[in-house]
Image: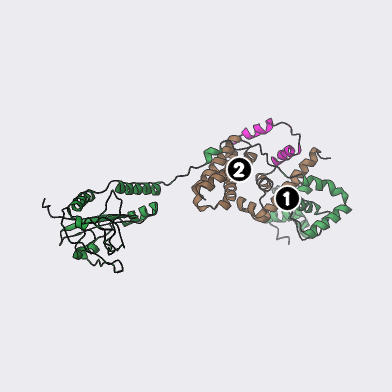
Chain colours: A green, B brown
C-alpha cells in the first residue's frame, strides 16, 4: 500500500482523507508520504460550501400541493376544502362533511368567511367609450329589387304604349266595320253562334282571344274574320283590308282549333328568364315570343301580360301601298 | 356570424373585454387598443365563428393580445403602469381591497380569477381560453383565492 501512493495519485488520496473516507492505515501512509515530500504544498484550509440555504415557508409549500378531492377533511387540507366550497365544486356529501368539521373546529369559521368575500365584482361603470367605431355596416344587395323594378317599368310601358302595328290594325278595323255591315253581329239572333273575335278594340277594352279558344255568345263587333284555312295561324292581322266571309263556329264544339302550323311552332321566347321574373313581380302570366319564317317571309311577335294579349305578324316583303 | 350578429357581440362584450384588459394592463389606452385589435381579428374570421362561440373567441383573442402586450412592455420596461398604481388612493371598501390584492397576483392567476368572477366561465372554458388544462386552471384559482384571502386577513377589514 505504501507504494500505491505516489506523486501521480496523492491528490485523490488526500481528498478522500479530507472527506473522511480513508481508513486509518491508508491515512497514516498518506501523511508519511506528504512528510517525505514537503515540496507538495497541500492546503489544509480548503473552502467548504455553506450548508445553510433558505427554507420555503409553509404557505408557499401548501400552494404547490395539489388538492386531493377524494381525501377526507382534516386540519392539513381544510383550506382547499374551504376554497372548493366557495367555488361551488363540492359534492353534497362533501358539503355535509365540511359543515360537520367546521362545527367541531370553529377556529376555521373566519377563514370560511374570508373566502366567501373573495369574489371579485366587475366595475360596471368602466365601459368601452366608442362601441360604434367597432361595428360594421351591413351592405344591402339591391340588384334583385332594381331588376324587378326595371322589369315592372317595361311591363307598364308595353301596356301604356301599344305597338305601331296595333294602331294600324285598329284603324283598319274601324274602316272594315263601316264598309262591311254584314260582318256585324246581331245579338238578338237566337241562332247566333259565337265567332272568334280576333282584334283588340282598344276603346271597348275587349280582349283578343287566342285563335285556339272558342267563346260562346261573345258579343263583340266582328271587324274581321280570318278565312277558315288561316284560323290556325296565330296572328295574321293584315295591314290592308281583305274582306272575307265570316266563319261561324258552333259553341257546343269543344274542339280546340289546331295550331299545327310550322310558323306558330317556330315562335320562341328569347327572354324567358325576364318574362318569368316579371311574372313573379306582377303576379300575372307574362309571355313573349318572336319568330320568323324565311319561307313565308314573315316575322312577328306575341306578348301576353295577364289577360292582355297582343301580337303582330307582318310580311317582310315591301308593302303594296 | 353575420354582420348583425357581429354588431350584437360588440354591444354585449366590448365593455367586458375592456374591463378585463384594463385590469391586466392598468392603462386605458392600451386596454382600448387590445379591445380594438380583438374585434378586428374576430371580424376577419367572422364567417368561421358561430354566434354562440363569439364570447369565448373574443376572450381568447383578448387574452393572447394581453399576454403579448405584457411581454412587450416587460422588454421595454414601461413604468407607466407602476405610476398609475402609485397614484391610486387608499382603498376603503372590500372590492377595492380585493382589486388591490388582484394586482399582486401573477398574470396567469389574475386572468383565471377574472374570467371566473367577472364572466362566470367554467374551469373547462377558462382552460380553452388560456390554453391550459382544467386541472391547471383549478390549481391557479385555488392559489389566487388563498392569496386574496390572506390579503383580506392582513388588512383586518373584516372582523
Visible in this render: residue A53?
no
Give the residue at x 76% y 36%.
Answer: B93
| Left or right side of A224 for A112 | right
Q: What residue sits right under mark 2 in the picture?
A: B17
Between B34 and A268, the one lying in front of the other is A268
For label 2, the SS is helix
Between A93 and A188, the one lying in front of the other is A188
Quadrant (top left/top right/bottom left/bottom right) for the C terminus of chain B: top right
Image position, residue A144 (x, y; %): 39, 49
Between circles 2 and 1, the one closer to the viewer is 2
Image position, residue A169 (x, y; %): 21, 51
Kindly identify which numbered label has been placed on residue B142. 1
The Cα–Cα distance between marks 2 and 1, rounded to whole angstroms, is 24 Å
Image-quadrant location for residue B147: top right
Vertical position of residue A230 compared to residue B137: above or below? below
| Left or right side of A117 for B4 | left
Between B93 and A17, the one lying in front of the other is B93
Q: Residues within 10 Å of mark 1 (few under 14, many from 20)?
A: many
| Label 2 in the same subunit as label 1 | yes
Q: Which residues are magenta?
A: B77-103
Q: Residues within 10 Å of mark 2 (few under 14, many from 20)?
A: many
| Left or right side of A136 for B156 | right
Amino acid at each position: 500500500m505504501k507504494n500505491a501512493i505516489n506523486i501521480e495519485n496523492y491528490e485523490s488520496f488526500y481528498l478522500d482523507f479530507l472527506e473522511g473516507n480513508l481508513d486509518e492505515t491508508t491515512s497514516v501512509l498518506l501523511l508519511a508520504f506528504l512528510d517525505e515530500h514537503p515540496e507538495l504544498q497541500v492546503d489544509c484550509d480548503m473552502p467548504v460550501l455553506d450548508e445553510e440555504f433558505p427554507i420555503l415557508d409553509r404557505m408557499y409549500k401548501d400552494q404547490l400541493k395539489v388538492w386531493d378531492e377524494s381525501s377526507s377533511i382534516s386540519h392539513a387540507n381544510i383550506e382547499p376544502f374551504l376554497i372548493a366550497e366557495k367555488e361551488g365544486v363540492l359534492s353534497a356529501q362533501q358539503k355535509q362533511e365540511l359543515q360537520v368539521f367546521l362545527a367541531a373546529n370553529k377556529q376555521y369559521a373566519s377563514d370560511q368567511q374570508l373566502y366567501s368575500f373573495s369574489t371579485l365584482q366587475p366595475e360596471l361603470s368602466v365601459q368601452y367609450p366608442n362601441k360604434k367605431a367597432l361595428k360594421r355596416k351591413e351592405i344591402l344587395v339591391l340588384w334583385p329589387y332594381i331588376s324587378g323594378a326595371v322589369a315592372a317599368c317595361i311591363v307598364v310601358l308595353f301596356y301604356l304604349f301599344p305597338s305601331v302595328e296595333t294602331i294600324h290594325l285598329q284603324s283598319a278595323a274601324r274602316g272594315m266595320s263601316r264598309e262591311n255591315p254584314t260582318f256585324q253581329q246581331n245579338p238578338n239572333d237566337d241562332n247566333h253562334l259565337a265567332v272568334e273575335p280576333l282584334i283588340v278594340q282598344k276603346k271597348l277594352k275587349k280582349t283578343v282571344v287566342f285563335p285556339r279558344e272558342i267563346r260562346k255568345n261573345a258579343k263583340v263587333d266582328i271587324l274581321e274574320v280570318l278565312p277558315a284555312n288561316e284560323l290556325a295561324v296565330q296572328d295574321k292581322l293584315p295591314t290592308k283590308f281583305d274582306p272575307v266571309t265570316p266563319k261561324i263556329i258552333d259553341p257546343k264544339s269543344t274542339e280546340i282549333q289546331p295550331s299545327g302550323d310550322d310558323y306558330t311552332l317556330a315562335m320562341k321566347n328569347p327572354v324567358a328568364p325576364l318574362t318569368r321574373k316579371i311574372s313573379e313581380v306582377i303576379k300575372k302570366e307574362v309571355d313573349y315570343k318572336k319568330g320568323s319564317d324565311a319561307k313565308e317571309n314573315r316575322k312577328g311577335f306575341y306578348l301576353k301580360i295577364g289577360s292582355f294579349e297582343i301580337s303582330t305578324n307582318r310580311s317582310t316583303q315591301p308593302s303594296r301601298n | 356570424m353575420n354582420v348583425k350578429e357581429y354588431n350584437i357581440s360588440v354591444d354585449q362584450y366590448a365593455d367586458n373585454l375592456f374591463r378585463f384588459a384594463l385590469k391586466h394592463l392598468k392603462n386605458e389606452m392600451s386596454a382600448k387598443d387590445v379591445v380594438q385589435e380583438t374585434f378586428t381579428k374576430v371580424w376577419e374570421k367572422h364567417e368561421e365563428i358561430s354566434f354562440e362561440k363569439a364570447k369565448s373567441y373574443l376572450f381568447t383573442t383578448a387574452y393572447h393580445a394581453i399576454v403579448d402586450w405584457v411581454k412587450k412592455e416587460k422588454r421595454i420596461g414601461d413604468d407607466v403602469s407602476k405610476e398609475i398604481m402609485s397614484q391610486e388612493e387608499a382603498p376603503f371598501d372590500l372590492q377595492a381591497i380585493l382589486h388591490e390584492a388582484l394586482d399582486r397576483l401573477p398574470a396567469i392567476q389574475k386572468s383565471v380569477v377574472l374570467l371566473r368572477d367577472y364572466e362566470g366561465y367554467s374551469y373547462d372554458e377558462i382552460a380553452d381560453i388560456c390554453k391550459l388544462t382544467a386541472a391547471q386552471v383549478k390549481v391557479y384559482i385555488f392559489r389566487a383565492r388563498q392569496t386574496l384571502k390572506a390579503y383580506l386577513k392582513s388588512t383586518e377589514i373584516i372582523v
